[in-house]
Amino acid sequence: MRFHKAEWAFFVFIFVILAASLVMLHAYGQLQSFALEVRNPDRLAKVTYLNQLLFIISLLLAAALCFGTFFIYPLIRRQVQEEGKLRAMTASLSARSETMEMAALTDSLTGTHNRRYFDTALSAYIEEFRRIGKPIGLMILDLDHFKQVNDTHGHDVGDEVLKAVGKCLKDMTRYHDVVARLGGEEFAVVTPNMDVDKLERFGQRIRKAVADLTIPTGNIHLRVTTSVGLAIWDGKESGDEFYRRADRQLYEAKRQGRNRVCA
């Protein structure tokens, strides 16, 4: 059992009282033997008085020892236990707060970030990269004919498709990229410090990876494709303008026949 600092201080206090009591008892014994050797009545009276004082002090020390052991220490122990409970409660509340905050920024189905986090992160990247003059890439993805998946196989299968695509995006991106589900079957990837050539190659790799996914449903393995719109931040536009430009490229990819990347 671990002891609190207040408990250790109390133990030291008790040890000092015990030591003082032992010294007092020793002095009392010495005075008793000395009193037997004294023949002068006046000195004998003083020695007897000192004996009485030492005896009273010993009683007071014994009372202090009992009071500290049976009254003060239980109070200290109870306070330490309550403090421990409060600390545990505070830690639990902090952990729950962090969990709730994370849940508020995470898409519960796919485990990717949600639209709220995406908007905040995109604005933060724009603000920082405007200062250092580096490029930011943005990728908007939309699964092709996803309504048919839900209508044909049911929403449970559709959810499994979204989970698989979310995992694929998280596995293929870097630790500082932002992967978010914007809603429905639409995802976004923010890729800082990536120019248009790298972003287009990256978008093609992701498009092919999604097309290679197989989602088992009953006796068949379902496949899906995605259309991808890309944009590189021009250094001036806001987050909303940046997003709308990438979104226009997504619709261009849809118009051209789907399962393709437009930048």
Image: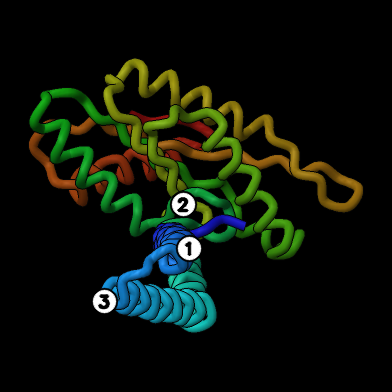
| Closer to the eye: label 1 or 2 | 1
Q: Residue at x 46, y 52 (%)?
A: 181
Which residue position is annotated with label 2?
181
Q: Is residue 176 left or right of residue 206?
A: left
Distance, label 1 to label 2, CA atoms, is 93 Å
Q: Say which amino acid is labelled 2.
A: Arg
Distance, label 3 to label 1, CA atoms, is 17 Å
Label 2 SS: strand
Work out whether residue 126 or residue 202 is closer to the camera in this orientation and state it: 126
- In the rendered image, the quadrant that contains the C terminus is top left
Q: Does 199 sit above or below residue 227?
A: above
Q: Residue at x 42, y 77 (%)?
A: 55
Residue reaching furthest right? 219
Q: Residue at x 16, y 31 (%)?
A: 129
* Classed neighbour count for the residue bearing mark 1: other residues with Cα under 10 Å, few (<14), some (14–19), many (≥20): few
Work out whether residue 252 or residue 243 is closer to the camera in this orientation and state it: 243
Q: Say which amino acid is labelled 3.
A: Asp
Q: Residue at x 61, y 51 (%)?
A: 162
Residue 200 in which image quadrant: top left
Residue 76 at least partly seen: yes
Q: Which mark is residue 42?
A: 3
Label 3 SS: helix
Label 1 SS: helix
* Classed neighbour count for the residue bearing mark 2: other residues with Cα under 10 Å, few (<14), some (14–19), many (≥20): many
Q: Say which amino acid is labelled 1.
A: Ser
Residue 118: give x, y in percent of width and height. Answer: 34, 50
* Classed neighbour count for the residue bearing mark 3: other residues with Cα under 10 Å, few (<14), some (14–19), many (≥20): few
Which residue position is annotated with label 1?
33
Residue 161: give x, y in percent of width and height. Answer: 66, 49
Mark nearer the N terminus (3 vs 1) = 1
Mark nearer the N terminus (3 vs 2) = 3
